[in-house]
Image (cartoon, rainbow, N blue to C red):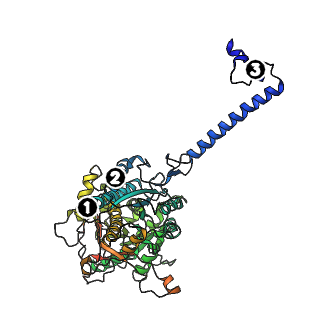
């Protein structure tokens, strides 16, 4: 009863304890209760909304939408995808070890961002789950090699996970964050990654990292449209891949008359550039024509990019190709489009080869040897239809691994990388290196690490992004790389600055920025049979017959 006795309520004002509450008192009391309840609810809802938009307590990763992917920059092992747990954890542990070394021994610490998608949930995603995982694994091997190697200028590298989203569209969030991290105890000195020749990739450099003077080293970009003074490429350009194919065709007596081109017709930077280069290098001379009567080219819609109708429909293109008896086919598309192309050939009755026919050679370019294509099933299709796939690539891991010691065409650093990769990631499939992404991301980070070490060797105590950019531009292959080549697992290389020697003003603005790799090997590989190329190993920027480049 005392609980109901208002006279015992010490918190209630005395004037209200000993009188009957009137209407005004009741209204005032309930108004106070409503205000306090509303304020608490508003605060709670506002706090929920604020934290709902972030994926981590430190707010480094922002959620793109309810249930959407998390974009932004972090050095911690956020679970972007289940199959990344191991490699993200390894990198995060190495990051912590690097920070601890900086705290206890004063070892200079720099940050390098790995800018790319970290999720792949839709068919048109920029990277597959396997390519994302392999790319991070290659970066980890390079990070370990730098942080624990003998020639690193006594510096340590911390990797930052910079997720631009599976469609690359969240580059502005990432570049703004990286720009803000250029100072401090672990300054951002460079970014690597940038997997697709895409307008979003170019915007990330032109409008984001370039104005902030942060150098970007792409692992696999190849389109010649991807030019900027702060964008370096570890991969040969499309022009150089196709040039290597042209030398192969000349040296190996490939059919030049019965030709055909099948091209991805998407308005995509990479495939548009590849279509253009194929036509320029092989068009008139090899009979590839768009003439409506004697048409020697057809198109299809590739798998990469936003949905626009049904992709990878090759029926019309393959029927036209086989109707004219094509024996040399130029395929201007991405790796993911090759298996459905081969399957369509296998189902098309007009493509059945005659007993005396030359092989149908499919000429294409790629970063590596696509494991999805080089399967037992695809091998049977190729052999049944007398098809030989000829690919100019940046990486030929199977051949390099099987080569005898002392083979002059095998990159010197590949064996060491291969051993390290399988020590850390032995649970991966045996063909994990075949796609080339682990090797190329290793080489991109090795290029940055070499620049950091070179800056320290020049008595620069605190290395920043400007120092790294300057060192990346200074390398030279002369005198067997005495002036600083990158010891890449895909071959030693340095960067060509094609703007050097250009005029002033408008003339210089029109000049290509270049910054493509010099002396990079471009092996030509064949499938299903391993055909030994009769031409010498192609090296970027080296003329045929010359030996100016050091051994790869």
Look at mark 3 in the image and give the residue it sits on.
Answer: 17
Left or right, residue 192 beside residue 19 = left
Q: Earlier in the sequence, mark 2 or mark 1?
A: 2
Look at mark 1 in the image and give the residue it sits on.
Answer: 149
Q: Identify which residue, 160 or 37, lies in the foreground.
A: 37
Position of the C terminus, as image quadrant, is bottom left
Position of the N terminus, as image quadrant, is top right
Check disc 2 and report its element: helix, strand or loop: helix
Q: Residue at x 26, y 51 (%)?
A: 426
Residue 196 in view in this figure: yes
Q: Identify which residue, 545 or 186, lies in the foreground.
A: 186
Depth check, mark 2 against mark 3: the one in front is 3
Instruction: Specify few, some or many for label 3: CA neighbours under 10 Å numbering under 14, 14-19, or 20 or more.
Output: some
Image coordinates of residue 24 in percent, x first then y, are 83, 28
**Residues at marks 1 and 3, CA–CA distance in whole angstroms:** 80 Å
Q: Quadrant of residue 340?
A: bottom left
**Residues at marks 2 and 1, CA–CA distance in whole angstroms:** 17 Å
What numbered label is drawn on residue 100?
A: 2
**Residues at marks 2 and 3, CA–CA distance in whole angstroms:** 64 Å
Which residue, as the protein is rendered here, is positioned at the far right?
23
Q: Are marks 2 and 3 in contact (CB under 8 Å)?
A: no
Which residue, as the protein is rendered here, is positioned at the far front?
14
Image coordinates of residue 451 in percent, x first then y, are 34, 70
Q: Identify which residue, 26 or 195, lies in the foreground.
A: 26
Image coordinates of residue 25 in percent, x first then y, are 80, 26
Depth check, mark 1 against mark 3: the one in front is 3
């Amino acid at each position: 009863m005392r609980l109901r006795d208002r006279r015992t309520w010490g918190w209630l004002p005395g004037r209200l304890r000993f009188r009957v509450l009137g209407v005004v008192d009741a209204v005032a009391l309930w108004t106070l209760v409503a205000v306090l309840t509303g304020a608490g609810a508003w605060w709670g809802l506002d706090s929920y909304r604020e934290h709902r938009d972030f994926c981590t307590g430190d707010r480094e990763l922002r959620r793109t939408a309810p249930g959407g992917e998390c974009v932004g920059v972090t050095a911690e092992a956020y679970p972007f995808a289940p199959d990344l747990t191991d490699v993200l954890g390894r990198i995060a542990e190495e990051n912590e070890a690097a920070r601890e070394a900086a705290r206890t021994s004063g070892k200079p610490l720099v940050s390098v961002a790995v800018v790319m998608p970290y999720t792949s949930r839709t068919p048109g995603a920029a990277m597959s789950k396997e390519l994302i995982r392999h790319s991070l694994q290659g970066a980890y091997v390079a990070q370990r090699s730098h942080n624990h190697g003998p020639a690193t200028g006594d510096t340590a590298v911390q990797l930052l996970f910079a997720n631009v989203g599976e469609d690359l569209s969240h580059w502005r969030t990432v570049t703004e964050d990286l720009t803000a991290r250029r100072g401090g105890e672990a300054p951002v000195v460079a970014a690597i990654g940038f997997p697709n020749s895409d307008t979003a990739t170019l915007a990330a450099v032109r409008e984001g990292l370039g104005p902030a003077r942060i150098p970007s080293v792409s692992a696999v970009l190849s389109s010649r449209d991807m030019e900027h003074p702060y964008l370096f490429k570890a991969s040969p350009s499309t022009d150089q891949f196709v040039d290597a194919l042209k030398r192969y065709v000349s040296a190996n007596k490939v059919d030049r008359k019965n030709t055909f081109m099948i091209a991805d017709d998407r308005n995509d930077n990479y495939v548009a550039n590849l279509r253009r280069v194929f036509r320029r290098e092989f068009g008139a001379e090899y009979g590839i024509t768009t003439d409506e009567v004697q048409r020697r080219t057809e198109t299809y819609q590739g798998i990469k990019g936003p949905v626009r109708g049904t992709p990878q429909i090759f029926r019309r293109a393959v029927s036209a190709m086989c109707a004219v008896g094509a024996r040399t086919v130029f395929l201007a598309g991405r790796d993911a489009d090759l298996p459905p192309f081969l399957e369509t050939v296998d189902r098309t009755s007009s493509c059945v080869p005659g007993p005396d026919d030359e092989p149908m050679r499919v000429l294409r370019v790629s970063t590596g040897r696509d494991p999805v294509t080089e399967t037992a099933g695809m091998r049977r299709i190729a052999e049944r239809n007398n098809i030989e796939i000829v690919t100019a690539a940046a990486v030929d891991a199977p051949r390099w691994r099987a080569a005898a010691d002392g083979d002059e065409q095998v990159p010197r650093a590949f064996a060491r990388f291969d051993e390290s990769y399988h020590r850390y990631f032995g649970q991966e499939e045996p063909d994990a290196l075949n796609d080339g992404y682990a090797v190329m991301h290793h080489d991109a980070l090795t290029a940055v690490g070499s620049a950091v070490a070179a800056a320290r060797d020049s008595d620069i105590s605190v290395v920043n992004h400007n120092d790294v950019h300057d060192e990346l531009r200074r390398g030279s292959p002369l005198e067997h790389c005495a002036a600083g080549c990158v010891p890449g697992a895909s071959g030693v290389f340095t960067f060509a600055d094609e703007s050097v020697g250009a005029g002033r003003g408008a003339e210089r603005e029109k000049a290509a920025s270049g910054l493509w790799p010099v002396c990079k090997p471009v092996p030509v590989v064949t499938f299903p049979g391993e055909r030994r190329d009769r031409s010498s190993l192609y090296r970027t920027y080296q003329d045929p017959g010359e030996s100016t480049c050091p051994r790869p």
